[in-house]
Amino acid sequence: MNALTLWFHKLGSPPYFYRFAGRLLPWLYGVSLLVASVGLYFGLVRAPADYLQGESVRILYIHVPCAWMSLFGYLTMAGAGFIAVVWRIKLAELIAMACAPVGAAFTFVTLVTGSLWGRPTWGTYWVWDARLTSELVLLFLYFGVIGLYRAFDDPRRGARAACLLALIGVVNLPIVHYSVEWWNTLHQGQSVRLMGESSMHSSMLVPLLMMALATHVYFFASVFARARVALLEQEGGKEWVRELARAGASA
Amino acid sequence: MGARARARGSVRVSHTPFIVAAYLVFVLVFAADALAPWLARRNVLARLHSRLVREQRGGANERP
Amino acid sequence: MTPGAPATAFVALLRRDLLVFWRHRSDALNPLVFALIVVTMFPLALGPEANELAPIAGGVTWVTVVLASLLSLDALFRSDAEDGSLDLLVASGQPLALLAAARLLAHWLGTGLPLVLAGPLLAALLGLPRDAVVTLGFALALGTPLLSLLGGTCAALTVGLRRSGILLSLLVLPLTLPVLIFGSGAVEAAVSGAAVQAPLLFLAAGLVLALPLAPLACAAAIRLNVS
């Protein structure tokens, strides 16, 4: 068994993951904060305003990365969920369930920033365009996973049920997305997208990609932090947790 | 610019409050999202700590 | 029929489910009555003008059908879970996906098929033109099995929970949105004279995808809740 496989197996052990994630967390938060600050500086200060949309295009630097992360979050949740359902690995269950609230937060921010972007651009706070409607359905799917998980008394069974639901949802996701696109073109409503067809100038692309990186790193930071808490709650009786508790409340 | 806009029939709304609101929502939501697991972890450890202390005291009282 | 063969088990379970359904056939009318009441609510809420109701007739009927098919989902596995029959099904050694398929088929025969027959009538009450009514029938015939497949799988996920009625609806409804979109899209196409094949084919494609996959997911959910 080579070193990488060995390390992977070790990672499945709760105390090892707890310590490993704990050491990684400050770096993850720090990097995401740093990259976000630089990215937002470039986006808010250095990049130009849009010819047509004016200053409000600056909302793009948070709206688009959050939209990407809302989708990435669901895919990650489904991936971890697949491992959890097939192999019943507890850590996979916890990671999958930790992805849900973070992904839902990204989805929520995508919707709100999209709405706030739409107001000066289109004149209304909400339009039933394909992208926003798809995003809203994604939020419902997240709520379903979270709701199902919390409805169970047994957290491990609840996690596996919610993971199965996430898998069903992930198969449904492209179907929902496509059907909403189809529905939107059918009704000839909004043909204006929040982002135009024009290719993006590098002065806008760079901050956008930096924000994308920052949100990715933040996603993992938040997921690891939540997984650690869930680990403590579920392993409460085990010796390694008692050691931590004995050492003091803020270990 | 304003006169022309009004003549065209469209008045430009100031974009600044929307940009501010959007960034505010972003910062607040993720500050809350980062804070929640940190607070929860402290809660869990505090609860476990007090439970351990109670068990030790209780164990001492049970001895004949 | 060879005893112990999967096909025999499938037929046996289907027969038993249909028999149970027949014995409670007044309960089985509930989704239909619900659909009728809901359809009645729209003219009461919006006014009886035919030219206001007719444009929304297809959409209203579809939403009503989706909601009505939800009603009988919660009880789909519950009584079997309570009296232990579900454990027997899992332990029977028969392919659980096949048994789940039998249950989902029974649900469609008991709830979906009546809605396929009643839906066009309800839409006609709201003033949907004749051609569109026929298209609606086809769309419902393709869509209601999808509703049973998706809904039944979610019912299996929540079978162990107390008071899961609302949660079940929240889980099922987002998954059924594509069915709603293509189903009512077909009706709108029929009304406006556009091609109805595209949305109907999408429904058919969805059904072809769901027919093997949903029973498998349903079986996994049952096993999860029974173990």
Image: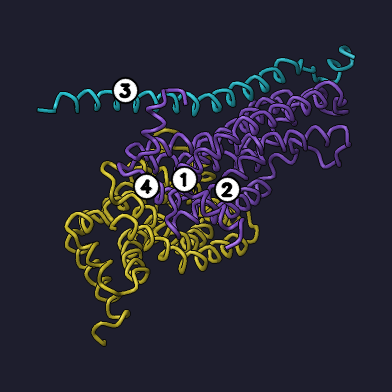
Report the front residue among A231 and A187. Answer: A231
Q: Nearer the viewer, mark 3 or mark 2?
A: 3
The residue that mark 2 highlights is A76
The residue that mark 3 highlights is B50
The residue that mark 1 highlights is C60
Q: Are dots 1 and 3 in contact, CB under 8 Å?
A: no
Asked if badge 2 and badge 4 are on a common chain, one would say yes
Residue farthest to the front?
B64
The residue that mark 4 highlights is A156
**Chain for mark 1?**
C
Q: Is A233 placed left or right of B59 in the picture?
A: right
Q: Colour of chain A?
A: purple
The residues tagged by marks 3 and 2 sit, at their Cα atoms, a distance apart of: 36 Å
The chain drawn in yellow is C
Q: Is A101 placed left or right of C43 in the picture?
A: right
Residue C161 in view: yes
